[in-house]
Image: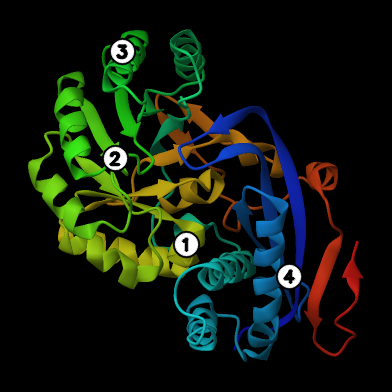
């Protein structure tokens, strides 16, 4: 039996972005992170985190983690699959979507990190893979950038070692999207790859027209062209689009992905804080491998670089730099591939100075077995 979890604590951080990011749904000026740490009876600590766009949402996520703390500490083992199953039983009443699953995901990440640290192995080795560089792409190129700004961003990405980039599309005029694609494609080396992300911008008819317009530009995939709940439209689009369709970042748990397998989506994106952490990610990966479907990451580059390393189905790490400063190491990007250190854990060894700089709360204990649960970790 592994050492049970003795305490659960969270801390909220706010990180200012260099430039605001504007999507069809949000204007993002800060990323709020809810750090989660679990400590076992032997004093080992496992880490996870959740992220969102404002403090109110961060407070809600932290409160949901706090609500799960008694469940986590009642567990007689800290095996990730066992803890995940117990948390799932507990959130049955609240349902298997939304903040309840976010909190489950944070717990699973931290329990998995704890298990890896206890075993002295990296996440890559824990899931049975041999560490290896994984294909990666620069994720940026937002709608608010002018064409000249897009070109400069592409040039910076190429200099940094990327051979693939993802451009956001969904301008009010489709011709503007096409012009921006042409500019980005021209700025890329001839053998570089280009993905597109429509951020759920269109209805089915508009998505088909857009896919036809984008097809001549050798697009790797068109991501989230429809509202993510339009499964009937997605099935039709997958069948008719000349560009491969990718989606999945808004799905919860393995059962949520079944709707995407049914729609025969060829490329899936799994978001660690919605899918249910590493435990549920691994279940989706097995299903994808059996179905011949490509599984890719959404955000969480420090963890995803380890999940995708050496995997035959979990490829394409989405690289976003927003969390780089919070860890005490650098990811290496060379020739379009990303490499993470092969050290113990899932990749969340905090840079304590950066955490202190971005912190908007102290460490708050949501439960310490045998002690006053109102205590704080400072």
- Numbered disc 3: secondary structure: helix
Residue 119: image x %, image y %?
A: 59, 68
**Which quarter of the image is occupied by the N terminus?**
bottom right
Check disc 2: other Cα within 10 Å, few if <14, some if 14-19, many if 20+. some
- Numbered disc 4: secondary structure: loop
Q: Earlier in the sequence, mark 3 or mark 2?
A: 3
Mark 1 → mark 4, Cα distance in angstroms: 26 Å
Q: Earlier in the sequence, mark 4 or mark 3?
A: 4
Q: Is residue 349 visible?
A: no
Check disc 4: other Cα within 10 Å, few if <14, some if 14-19, many if 20+. some
The mark closer to the camera, 4 or 3, is 3
What residue is drawn where x is 62% and y is 84%? 2
Mark 3 → mark 1, Cα distance in angstroms: 34 Å
Check disc 1: other Cα within 10 Å, few if <14, some if 14-19, many if 20+. many
What residue is drawn where x is 65% and y is 65%? 61
Residue 252: image x %, image y %?
A: 41, 66
Residue tagged 2: 202
Mark 4 → mark 2, Cα distance in angstroms: 48 Å
Q: How many badges with numbers are in the image?
A: 4
Is 18 placed above or below 346 here? above
Residue tagged 4: 44
Mark 3 → mark 2, Cα distance in angstroms: 18 Å
Check disc 3: other Cα within 10 Å, few if <14, some if 14-19, many if 20+. few
Residue tagged 3: 179
Residue tagged 1: 274
Q: Earlier in the sequence, mark 1 or mark 4?
A: 4
Mark 4 → mark 3, Cα distance in angstroms: 53 Å
């Amino acid at each position: 039996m592994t050492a049970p979890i003795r305490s659960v604590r969270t801390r909220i951080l706010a990180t200012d972005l260099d430039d605001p990011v504007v999507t069809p749904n949000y204007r993002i000026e800060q990323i709020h992170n809810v750090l989660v740490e679990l400590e076992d009876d032997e004093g080992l600590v496992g880490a996870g985190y959740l992220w969102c766009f404002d403090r109110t949402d961060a407070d809600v996520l932290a409160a949901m983690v706090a609500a799960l703390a008694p469940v986590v500490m009642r567990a007689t083992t800290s095996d990730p699959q066992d803890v995940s199953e117990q948390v799932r039983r507990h959130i049955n009443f609240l349902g298997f979507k939304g903040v309840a699953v976010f909190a489950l995901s944070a717990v699973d990440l931290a329990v998995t990190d704890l298990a890896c640290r206890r075993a002295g192995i990296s996440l890559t080795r824990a899931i049975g893979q041999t560490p290896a560089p994984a294909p990666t792409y620069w994720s940026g190129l937002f709608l608010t950038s002018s064409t000249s700004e897009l070109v400069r961003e592409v040039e910076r990405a190429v200099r940094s070692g990327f051979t693939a980039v993802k451009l956001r599309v969904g301008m009010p005029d489709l011709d503007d999207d096409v012009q921006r694609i042409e500019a980005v494609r021209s700025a890329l080396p001839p053998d570089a790859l280009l993905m597109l992300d429509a951020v759920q911008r269109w209805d089915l008819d508009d998505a088909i027209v857009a896919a036809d317009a984008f097809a001549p530009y050798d697009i790797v995939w068109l991501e989230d062209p429809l509202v993510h709940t339009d499964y009937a439209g997605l099935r039709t689009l997958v069948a008719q689009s000349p560009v491969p369709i990718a989606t999945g970042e808004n799905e919860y748990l393995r059962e949520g992905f079944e709707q995407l397998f049914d729609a025969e989506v060829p490329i899936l994106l799994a978001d660690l804080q919605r899918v249910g952490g590493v435990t549920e990610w691994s279940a989706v990966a097995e299903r994808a491998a059996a179905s011949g479907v490509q599984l890719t990451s959404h955000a969480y580059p420090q963890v995803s670089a380890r999940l995708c390393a050496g995997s035959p189905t979990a490829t394409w790490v989405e690289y976003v730099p927003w969390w780089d400063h919070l860890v005490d190491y650098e990811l290496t990007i060379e020739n379009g591939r990303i490499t993470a250190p092969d050290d113990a854990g899932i990749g969340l060894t905090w840079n304590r100075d950066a955490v202190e700089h971005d912190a908007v709360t102290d460490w708050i204990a949501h439960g310490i077995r045998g002690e006053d649960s109102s205590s704080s970790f400072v």
